[in-house]
Image (cartoon, grey):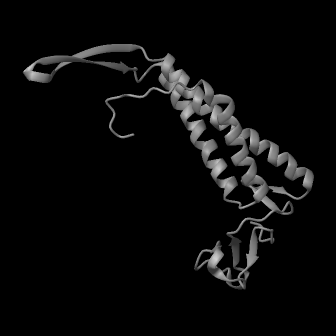
Amino acid sequence: MSHSMNSSMLPATHPPEHQHSTATPGHGHGSDMMMMAMTFQFSYENVPLLFSGLTINTPGEMAGAFVAVFFLAMFYEGLKIARECLLRKSQVSIRYNSMPVPGPNGTILMETHKTVGQQMLSFPHLLQTVLHIIQVVVSYFLMLIFMTYNGYLCIAVAAGAGTGYFFFSWKKAVVVDITEHCH
């Protein structure tokens, strides 16, 4: 475990209102206790990125990380839309259920509901499960990248997500159910 100082960690002498201790009580860190910066900074030196061996140290590395994070955020948005499209295509059993509802002047009306189902042990459901796992992992990676509080990487996450939404979500079908009361 490396105890080297990087730009996202500050000595414990700074005011605590914007810092979070990374040391665990009772683990013998004593005076080596480091505080993690909780404010945004625009640095490209000693910026940790997800894994201990992946540290950004030059402007070129930051530019490469920016592009990679940007495309990762775009991929996340595309994956969300792709899963929705796959779900619509894999809907296999469609049932129509009718039920009587009271109408005006004591009349009875028939209301029809469409029920769409999917089998649990089917290829489409297994594919959706794998894609869901990938989507969750990517979303946590993006969250952790944002939590580095590096301004460049935060901009890459936000810009990539916005660009991905722009390119992929225009195909998204918006269906409004008039019987839904929680809008």
Residue 163: quarter of image = top right
Q: Is residue 169 above or below residue 18?
A: above
**What residue is rendered at 18% in x and 19% in y?**
99
**What residue is rendered at 62% in x and 79% in y?**
17
Residue 69 can be seen in this image? yes
Marks counted in the figure total: 0
Q: Where is residue 158 in the image (x, y as percent from the top left)?
A: 69, 47
Q: Position of residue 54 (x, y in %)?
A: 80, 54
Residue 81: quarter of image = top right
Q: Position of residue 156 (x, y in %)?
A: 75, 48
Q: Where is residue 37 in the image (x, y as percent from the top left)?
A: 71, 71
**What residue is rendered at 67% in x and 33% in y?**
166
Q: Is residue 46 above or below residue 95?
A: below
Residue 73 can be seen in this image? no
**What residue is rendered at 54% in x and 21% in y?**
86
Q: Quadrant of the N terminus?
A: bottom right
Residue 151: quarter of image = bottom right
Q: In which quarter of the image is the C terminus?
A: top left
Q: Is residue 121 above or below residue 22?
A: above
Frontmost residue, 31 versus 60: 60
Q: In this view, does 131 lie above or below 52?
A: above
Residue sitting farthest toward the left? 106
